[in-house]
Amino acid sequence: MIFFRRKKKEPPAPVEAEEKPQPENPEIEIVEPEAAEPEPPSPEPADDSEAEKTGGWMARLRSGLGKTARKISAGLADVIGKPSLDAAAVEAIEDTLIMADLGMDAASRLAGGLSKRPFPDGVNTESLADALAEEIAAILRPVEKPLAVDDTNRPHVILMVGVNGSGKTTTAGKLAEFFQSRGKSVMLAAADTFRAAAVEQLRVWGERTATPVITGEEGADAAAVAFRALEAAVADGMDILIIDTAGRLQARTELMDELAKIHRVIGKQDETAPHDSIIVLDGTVGQNALSQVKAFSEVAGLTGMIVTKLDGSARGGVVVALAEEYGLPIHAIGVGESKDDLQPFEADAFAMALASSHTGKV
Ligand SMILES: Nc1nc2c(ncn2[C@@H]2O[C@H](COP(=O)(O)OP(=O)(O)OP(=O)(O)O)[C@@H](O)[C@H]2O)c(=O)[nH]1
Ligand SMILES: [Mg+2]
Protein backbone atom coordinates (compact mmCIF):
# COMPACT_ATOMS: atom_id res chain seq x y z
CA MET A 1 0.00 0.00 0.00
CA ILE A 2 1.33 3.45 -0.88
CA PHE A 3 0.69 6.39 1.34
CA PHE A 4 1.42 10.06 1.09
CA ARG A 5 4.58 10.17 3.15
CA ARG A 6 4.92 13.49 4.88
CA LYS A 7 8.30 15.11 4.95
CA LYS A 8 9.06 17.35 7.87
CA LYS A 9 7.76 20.69 6.83
CA GLU A 10 10.26 23.48 6.12
CA PRO A 11 9.21 26.79 7.66
CA PRO A 12 7.83 28.98 4.90
CA ALA A 13 10.59 31.07 3.31
CA PRO A 14 10.43 34.74 4.29
CA VAL A 15 8.89 36.73 1.50
CA GLU A 16 10.86 39.76 0.39
CA ALA A 17 8.44 42.63 0.11
CA GLU A 18 10.06 44.01 -3.03
CA GLU A 19 9.82 40.64 -4.74
CA LYS A 20 6.07 40.51 -4.45
CA PRO A 21 4.37 41.25 -7.74
CA GLN A 22 2.21 44.31 -7.32
CA PRO A 23 -1.13 43.59 -8.92
CA GLU A 24 -2.00 46.33 -11.36
CA ASN A 25 -5.65 45.42 -11.15
CA PRO A 26 -7.09 46.75 -7.90
CA GLU A 27 -9.70 43.98 -7.97
CA ILE A 28 -7.01 41.37 -7.48
CA GLU A 29 -5.26 40.75 -4.22
CA ILE A 30 -2.43 38.46 -3.23
CA VAL A 31 -2.82 37.16 0.28
CA GLU A 32 0.40 35.86 1.74
CA PRO A 33 -0.06 33.31 4.47
CA GLU A 34 0.96 34.50 7.88
CA ALA A 35 4.36 32.91 8.33
CA ALA A 36 4.77 30.46 11.19
CA GLU A 37 1.08 30.51 12.03
CA PRO A 38 0.48 27.83 14.59
CA GLU A 39 -1.24 24.82 13.08
CA PRO A 40 -4.99 24.90 13.60
CA PRO A 41 -6.18 22.17 15.92
CA SER A 42 -6.13 18.94 14.01
CA PRO A 43 -8.64 16.20 14.62
CA GLU A 44 -5.70 13.82 14.69
CA PRO A 45 -2.97 13.92 17.35
CA ALA A 46 0.17 15.59 15.97
CA ASP A 47 2.53 12.73 16.73
CA ASP A 48 0.31 10.04 15.34
CA SER A 49 2.29 7.16 13.93
CA GLU A 50 1.75 6.54 10.25
CA ALA A 51 0.05 3.27 11.03
CA GLU A 52 -2.44 4.97 13.31
CA LYS A 53 -3.08 7.67 10.73
CA THR A 54 -3.60 5.04 8.09
CA GLY A 55 -5.98 3.21 10.38
CA GLY A 56 -7.89 6.48 10.72
CA TRP A 57 -8.54 7.13 7.05
CA MET A 58 -8.80 3.47 6.10
CA ALA A 59 -11.34 2.97 8.85
CA ARG A 60 -13.35 5.92 7.56
CA LEU A 61 -13.14 4.67 3.97
CA ARG A 62 -14.17 1.20 5.08
CA SER A 63 -17.07 2.50 7.07
CA GLY A 64 -18.20 4.53 4.05
CA LEU A 65 -17.72 1.75 1.51
CA GLY A 66 -18.96 -0.77 4.07
CA LYS A 67 -22.50 0.46 3.47
CA THR A 68 -22.18 -0.39 -0.22
CA ALA A 69 -20.34 -3.61 0.56
CA ARG A 70 -23.15 -4.72 2.87
CA LYS A 71 -25.69 -3.96 0.14
CA ILE A 72 -23.67 -6.16 -2.22
CA SER A 73 -23.27 -9.01 0.24
CA ALA A 74 -26.98 -8.97 1.13
CA GLY A 75 -27.81 -9.12 -2.58
CA LEU A 76 -25.45 -12.05 -3.10
CA ALA A 77 -26.73 -14.09 -0.15
CA ASP A 78 -28.93 -16.30 -2.35
CA VAL A 79 -26.00 -17.24 -4.54
CA ILE A 80 -23.89 -18.52 -1.66
CA GLY A 81 -23.90 -22.30 -1.30
CA LYS A 82 -24.44 -23.09 -4.97
CA PRO A 83 -21.93 -25.45 -6.59
CA SER A 84 -21.31 -22.94 -9.39
CA LEU A 85 -22.74 -19.74 -10.83
CA ASP A 86 -25.69 -20.61 -13.04
CA ALA A 87 -27.46 -18.12 -15.30
CA ALA A 88 -29.90 -17.08 -12.56
CA ALA A 89 -27.04 -16.47 -10.15
CA VAL A 90 -25.18 -14.35 -12.69
CA GLU A 91 -28.30 -12.28 -13.27
CA ALA A 92 -28.78 -11.81 -9.54
CA ILE A 93 -25.19 -10.64 -9.22
CA GLU A 94 -25.62 -8.17 -12.06
CA ASP A 95 -28.81 -6.72 -10.51
CA THR A 96 -27.13 -6.42 -7.14
CA LEU A 97 -24.15 -4.55 -8.57
CA ILE A 98 -26.41 -2.16 -10.50
CA MET A 99 -28.28 -1.38 -7.28
CA ALA A 100 -24.96 -0.75 -5.55
CA ASP A 101 -24.22 2.09 -8.02
CA LEU A 102 -21.58 0.26 -10.05
CA GLY A 103 -23.49 1.09 -13.24
CA MET A 104 -24.98 -1.17 -15.89
CA ASP A 105 -21.87 -1.61 -18.01
CA ALA A 106 -19.54 -2.45 -15.13
CA ALA A 107 -22.19 -4.68 -13.53
CA SER A 108 -22.63 -6.66 -16.71
CA ARG A 109 -18.87 -6.92 -17.27
CA LEU A 110 -18.30 -8.04 -13.67
CA ALA A 111 -21.11 -10.59 -13.74
CA GLY A 112 -19.80 -11.89 -17.07
CA GLY A 113 -16.28 -12.18 -15.63
CA LEU A 114 -17.55 -14.06 -12.58
CA SER A 115 -19.58 -16.46 -14.73
CA LYS A 116 -16.37 -17.62 -16.41
CA ARG A 117 -14.58 -18.35 -13.16
CA PRO A 118 -14.37 -21.82 -11.72
CA PHE A 119 -15.48 -22.31 -8.12
CA PRO A 120 -13.86 -25.67 -7.33
CA ASP A 121 -15.07 -25.63 -3.72
CA GLY A 122 -18.47 -24.22 -4.58
CA VAL A 123 -19.61 -20.63 -4.24
CA ASN A 124 -18.98 -19.56 -0.68
CA THR A 125 -18.78 -16.12 0.89
CA GLU A 126 -15.04 -15.96 0.66
CA SER A 127 -14.50 -17.36 -2.82
CA LEU A 128 -17.18 -15.10 -4.26
CA ALA A 129 -15.83 -12.01 -2.49
CA ASP A 130 -12.29 -12.76 -3.65
CA ALA A 131 -13.40 -13.30 -7.23
CA LEU A 132 -15.52 -10.14 -7.20
CA ALA A 133 -12.66 -8.10 -5.71
CA GLU A 134 -10.34 -9.33 -8.46
CA GLU A 135 -12.83 -8.49 -11.18
CA ILE A 136 -13.47 -5.00 -9.74
CA ALA A 137 -9.74 -4.36 -9.36
CA ALA A 138 -9.25 -5.21 -13.04
CA ILE A 139 -11.62 -2.35 -13.92
CA LEU A 140 -10.06 0.06 -11.44
CA ARG A 141 -6.35 -0.60 -12.00
CA PRO A 142 -6.08 1.23 -15.34
CA VAL A 143 -7.37 4.45 -13.73
CA GLU A 144 -5.15 4.31 -10.63
CA LYS A 145 -2.85 7.22 -11.48
CA PRO A 146 -1.40 9.53 -8.86
CA LEU A 147 -1.39 13.20 -9.77
CA ALA A 148 2.05 13.77 -11.28
CA VAL A 149 3.54 17.20 -11.64
CA ASP A 150 5.86 17.95 -14.52
CA ASP A 151 8.72 20.15 -13.26
CA THR A 152 9.30 21.58 -16.71
CA ASN A 153 5.96 23.36 -16.40
CA ARG A 154 6.59 26.71 -14.73
CA PRO A 155 4.19 26.56 -13.07
CA HIS A 156 2.25 23.33 -13.42
CA VAL A 157 -1.35 24.58 -13.56
CA ILE A 158 -4.15 22.55 -12.02
CA LEU A 159 -7.74 23.66 -12.64
CA MET A 160 -10.38 22.38 -10.21
CA VAL A 161 -13.90 22.07 -11.60
CA GLY A 162 -17.19 20.51 -10.60
CA VAL A 163 -20.75 21.09 -9.43
CA ASN A 164 -21.70 23.00 -6.29
CA GLY A 165 -20.47 21.55 -3.05
CA SER A 166 -18.55 18.63 -4.54
CA GLY A 167 -15.43 19.47 -2.52
CA LYS A 168 -13.34 21.58 -4.92
CA THR A 169 -12.11 24.17 -2.43
CA THR A 170 -11.38 21.60 0.26
CA THR A 171 -9.54 19.42 -2.24
CA ALA A 172 -7.56 22.40 -3.57
CA GLY A 173 -6.41 23.04 0.01
CA LYS A 174 -5.57 19.38 0.57
CA LEU A 175 -3.57 19.29 -2.68
CA ALA A 176 -1.63 22.39 -1.61
CA GLU A 177 -0.76 20.61 1.62
CA PHE A 178 0.23 17.44 -0.20
CA PHE A 179 2.51 19.10 -2.72
CA GLN A 180 4.11 21.42 -0.17
CA SER A 181 4.84 18.50 2.09
CA ARG A 182 6.82 17.14 -0.85
CA GLY A 183 8.88 20.31 -1.15
CA LYS A 184 6.96 21.97 -4.00
CA SER A 185 6.03 25.63 -3.94
CA VAL A 186 2.30 26.11 -4.44
CA MET A 187 0.02 29.06 -5.07
CA LEU A 188 -3.77 28.94 -4.82
CA ALA A 189 -6.12 31.06 -6.91
CA ALA A 190 -9.69 31.86 -5.89
CA ALA A 191 -11.38 32.02 -9.27
CA ASP A 192 -14.69 31.50 -7.48
CA THR A 193 -15.81 35.09 -7.35
CA PHE A 194 -19.52 34.47 -6.91
CA ARG A 195 -19.51 34.57 -3.16
CA ALA A 196 -17.23 36.47 -0.79
CA ALA A 197 -17.46 33.44 1.50
CA ALA A 198 -15.88 31.27 -1.19
CA VAL A 199 -12.83 33.51 -1.36
CA GLU A 200 -12.63 33.59 2.41
CA GLN A 201 -12.83 29.77 2.53
CA LEU A 202 -9.82 29.45 0.22
CA ARG A 203 -7.97 32.10 2.27
CA VAL A 204 -8.49 29.96 5.35
CA TRP A 205 -7.05 26.98 3.48
CA GLY A 206 -4.12 29.21 2.47
CA GLU A 207 -3.46 29.99 6.13
CA ARG A 208 -3.94 26.41 7.22
CA THR A 209 -1.44 25.14 4.66
CA ALA A 210 0.88 28.20 4.53
CA THR A 211 0.08 28.78 0.86
CA PRO A 212 -0.21 32.19 -0.85
CA VAL A 213 -3.67 32.80 -2.27
CA ILE A 214 -4.56 35.06 -5.19
CA THR A 215 -8.04 36.43 -4.77
CA GLY A 216 -10.40 38.67 -6.68
CA GLU A 217 -13.24 40.70 -5.26
CA GLU A 218 -16.73 39.29 -5.17
CA GLY A 219 -18.21 39.65 -8.63
CA ALA A 220 -14.81 40.05 -10.34
CA ASP A 221 -14.30 38.25 -13.63
CA ALA A 222 -13.20 34.71 -12.73
CA ALA A 223 -11.09 34.37 -15.87
CA ALA A 224 -9.28 37.62 -14.98
CA VAL A 225 -8.43 36.24 -11.56
CA ALA A 226 -7.09 33.05 -13.14
CA PHE A 227 -5.07 35.13 -15.60
CA ARG A 228 -3.56 37.29 -12.86
CA ALA A 229 -2.86 34.27 -10.72
CA LEU A 230 -0.88 32.64 -13.49
CA GLU A 231 1.08 35.87 -14.00
CA ALA A 232 1.85 36.00 -10.28
CA ALA A 233 2.81 32.32 -10.13
CA VAL A 234 5.20 32.79 -13.07
CA ALA A 235 6.69 35.93 -11.48
CA ASP A 236 7.20 34.13 -8.17
CA GLY A 237 8.69 31.04 -9.82
CA MET A 238 6.03 28.76 -8.31
CA ASP A 239 6.11 25.05 -9.07
CA ILE A 240 2.35 24.66 -8.98
CA LEU A 241 -0.71 26.87 -9.35
CA ILE A 242 -4.03 25.40 -8.21
CA ILE A 243 -7.07 27.30 -9.48
CA ASP A 244 -10.29 26.84 -7.53
CA THR A 245 -13.45 27.64 -9.47
CA ALA A 246 -17.08 28.20 -8.52
CA GLY A 247 -19.40 25.24 -8.41
CA ARG A 248 -21.76 25.16 -11.34
CA LEU A 249 -24.57 22.94 -12.47
CA GLN A 250 -23.98 21.42 -15.85
CA ALA A 251 -27.32 22.75 -17.11
CA ARG A 252 -26.35 26.41 -16.50
CA THR A 253 -24.94 27.29 -19.90
CA GLU A 254 -23.65 30.74 -18.98
CA LEU A 255 -21.66 29.30 -16.08
CA MET A 256 -20.28 26.51 -18.20
CA ASP A 257 -19.29 29.17 -20.75
CA GLU A 258 -17.45 31.02 -18.00
CA LEU A 259 -15.51 27.87 -17.21
CA ALA A 260 -14.61 27.43 -20.87
CA LYS A 261 -13.37 31.03 -20.81
CA ILE A 262 -11.16 30.39 -17.76
CA HIS A 263 -9.73 27.37 -19.57
CA ARG A 264 -9.15 29.40 -22.73
CA VAL A 265 -7.54 32.35 -20.98
CA ILE A 266 -5.06 30.12 -19.17
CA GLY A 267 -4.27 28.37 -22.43
CA LYS A 268 -3.51 31.69 -24.12
CA GLN A 269 -0.88 32.49 -21.51
CA ASP A 270 0.70 29.07 -21.67
CA GLU A 271 -0.46 26.89 -24.50
CA THR A 272 0.27 23.74 -22.51
CA ALA A 273 -1.90 24.90 -19.57
CA PRO A 274 -3.94 23.92 -17.71
CA HIS A 275 -1.79 20.84 -17.32
CA ASP A 276 -4.44 19.16 -15.25
CA SER A 277 -8.13 19.86 -15.37
CA ILE A 278 -9.61 17.88 -12.54
CA ILE A 279 -13.25 17.26 -11.88
CA VAL A 280 -14.04 16.93 -8.20
CA LEU A 281 -16.96 14.55 -7.72
CA ASP A 282 -19.03 14.07 -4.60
CA GLY A 283 -18.97 10.34 -3.94
CA THR A 284 -22.38 10.49 -2.26
CA VAL A 285 -24.36 11.45 -5.38
CA GLY A 286 -24.26 8.10 -7.14
CA GLN A 287 -24.93 7.86 -10.86
CA ASN A 288 -25.30 11.61 -11.27
CA ALA A 289 -21.51 11.79 -11.16
CA LEU A 290 -21.42 10.20 -14.62
CA SER A 291 -23.37 12.97 -16.32
CA GLN A 292 -21.24 15.56 -14.52
CA VAL A 293 -18.07 14.11 -16.03
CA LYS A 294 -19.60 14.21 -19.49
CA ALA A 295 -20.77 17.83 -19.22
CA PHE A 296 -17.56 19.16 -17.72
CA SER A 297 -15.30 17.31 -20.13
CA GLU A 298 -16.97 19.21 -22.97
CA VAL A 299 -15.98 22.63 -21.61
CA ALA A 300 -12.93 21.97 -19.47
CA GLY A 301 -11.05 19.18 -21.26
CA LEU A 302 -10.87 16.96 -18.18
CA THR A 303 -7.65 15.09 -17.49
CA GLY A 304 -8.58 13.37 -14.25
CA MET A 305 -10.96 12.96 -11.34
CA ILE A 306 -10.92 13.14 -7.57
CA VAL A 307 -13.84 11.57 -5.72
CA THR A 308 -14.61 13.09 -2.31
CA LYS A 309 -16.65 12.18 0.76
CA LEU A 310 -15.97 8.48 0.42
CA ASP A 311 -15.59 8.38 4.20
CA GLY A 312 -19.32 8.78 4.60
CA SER A 313 -20.72 7.69 1.27
CA ALA A 314 -23.18 4.89 0.88
CA ARG A 315 -22.74 5.21 -2.86
CA GLY A 316 -19.02 4.69 -3.36
CA GLY A 317 -19.74 1.99 -5.93
CA VAL A 318 -20.04 4.80 -8.45
CA VAL A 319 -16.23 4.91 -8.60
CA VAL A 320 -16.37 1.62 -10.51
CA ALA A 321 -18.98 3.03 -12.89
CA LEU A 322 -16.77 6.09 -13.48
CA ALA A 323 -13.74 3.96 -14.23
CA GLU A 324 -15.69 1.73 -16.60
CA GLU A 325 -17.43 4.56 -18.40
CA TYR A 326 -14.67 7.13 -18.86
CA GLY A 327 -11.31 5.55 -18.14
CA LEU A 328 -10.13 8.96 -16.86
CA PRO A 329 -7.42 8.75 -14.20
CA ILE A 330 -8.71 8.75 -10.63
CA HIS A 331 -5.93 10.59 -8.85
CA ALA A 332 -7.09 10.57 -5.29
CA ILE A 333 -10.04 10.18 -2.97
CA GLY A 334 -11.31 12.43 -0.20
CA VAL A 335 -11.82 10.64 3.09
CA GLY A 336 -12.52 13.50 5.49
CA GLU A 337 -12.50 17.25 5.95
CA SER A 338 -9.03 17.94 7.26
CA LYS A 339 -5.93 18.79 5.25
CA ASP A 340 -4.44 15.28 5.37
CA ASP A 341 -7.65 13.54 4.32
CA LEU A 342 -6.73 13.09 0.68
CA GLN A 343 -5.39 9.69 -0.24
CA PRO A 344 -4.05 8.31 -3.48
CA PHE A 345 -6.55 6.08 -5.17
CA GLU A 346 -5.59 2.44 -4.79
CA ALA A 347 -7.49 0.05 -7.01
CA ASP A 348 -6.82 -3.15 -5.08
CA ALA A 349 -7.64 -1.74 -1.65
CA PHE A 350 -10.76 -0.07 -2.99
CA ALA A 351 -11.95 -3.22 -4.75
CA MET A 352 -11.36 -5.29 -1.64
CA ALA A 353 -13.24 -2.82 0.56
CA LEU A 354 -16.23 -2.93 -1.82
CA ALA A 355 -16.33 -6.68 -2.25
CA SER A 356 -15.28 -8.15 1.05
CA SER A 357 -16.79 -6.41 4.04
CA HIS A 358 -18.52 -9.59 5.13
CA THR A 359 -15.41 -11.75 5.00
CA GLY A 360 -13.68 -9.64 7.64
CA LYS A 361 -10.65 -9.37 5.35
CA VAL A 362 -10.58 -5.62 5.22
N1 LIG B 1 -16.59 13.99 4.94
C1 LIG B 1 -16.02 14.69 3.95
N2 LIG B 1 -16.39 15.94 3.69
C2 LIG B 1 -15.80 16.59 2.68
C3 LIG B 1 -14.80 16.00 1.87
N3 LIG B 1 -14.42 16.90 0.94
C4 LIG B 1 -15.14 18.03 1.17
N4 LIG B 1 -15.98 17.85 2.21
C5 LIG B 1 -16.96 18.79 2.77
O1 LIG B 1 -17.92 19.09 1.80
C6 LIG B 1 -18.39 20.43 1.94
C7 LIG B 1 -18.24 21.16 0.61
O2 LIG B 1 -16.86 21.26 0.32
P1 LIG B 1 -16.26 22.47 -0.52
O3 LIG B 1 -14.81 22.23 -0.65
O4 LIG B 1 -16.70 23.77 0.02
O5 LIG B 1 -16.99 22.22 -1.90
P2 LIG B 1 -16.92 23.11 -3.21
O6 LIG B 1 -17.00 22.19 -4.36
O7 LIG B 1 -15.77 24.04 -3.15
O8 LIG B 1 -18.28 23.94 -3.07
P3 LIG B 1 -18.73 25.22 -3.96
O9 LIG B 1 -17.55 26.11 -4.05
O10 LIG B 1 -19.86 25.81 -3.18
O11 LIG B 1 -19.16 24.67 -5.26
C8 LIG B 1 -17.56 21.04 3.06
O12 LIG B 1 -18.29 20.98 4.24
C9 LIG B 1 -16.34 20.13 3.12
O13 LIG B 1 -15.75 20.12 4.41
C10 LIG B 1 -14.43 14.63 2.15
O14 LIG B 1 -13.59 14.00 1.50
N5 LIG B 1 -15.07 14.03 3.20
MG1 LIG C 1 -15.68 26.06 -3.40
Image (spheres, helix red, strand yellow):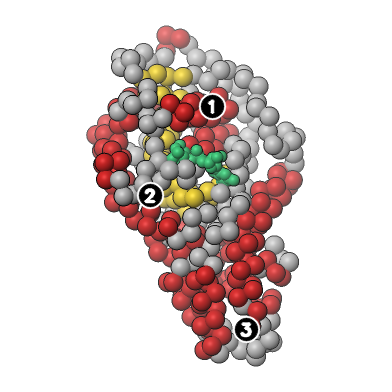
Does the residue at mark 3 contact the one at mark 2 (Cβ under 8 Å)? Answer: no
- Return the disc, 1 or 3, that comes first in the chain's sequence: 3
Q: Is residue 150 left or right of residue 6?
A: left
Q: Which tag is nearer the camera, tag 3 or tag 2?
A: 3
Does the residue at mark 2 contact the one at mark 1 (Cβ under 8 Å)? Answer: no
Residue behind mark 3 = 79
Residue 119 appears in the rendering: yes
- Return the disc, 2 or 1, that comes first in the chain's sequence: 1
Residue behind mark 1 = 204
Estimate the spatial distance between the alpha carbons at disc 3 and disc 2, rounded to whole Å. Answer: 39 Å
Q: How many residues crowd mark 1 within 10 Å: few (<14), some (14–19), many (20+)?
A: some
For the residue with label 2, is its CB less than 8 Å from the closest atom of ligand 1? no
Q: Amino acid at mark 1?
A: Val
What secondary structure is marked by label 1? Answer: helix
- Return the disc, 3 or 2, that comes first in the chain's sequence: 3
Picture coordinates of residue 167 (x, y %)? 49, 43
Estimate the spatial distance between the alpha carbons at disc 1 and disc 3, rounded to whole Å. Answer: 51 Å
**Front residue of 90 and 342:** 90
Picture coordinates of residue 156 (x, y %)? 40, 36
Quadrant of the rendering where the N terminus is positioned: bottom right
Residue behind mark 2 = 303
Q: Amino acid at mark 2?
A: Thr
Q: How many residues crowd mark 3 within 10 Å: few (<14), some (14–19), many (20+)?
A: many
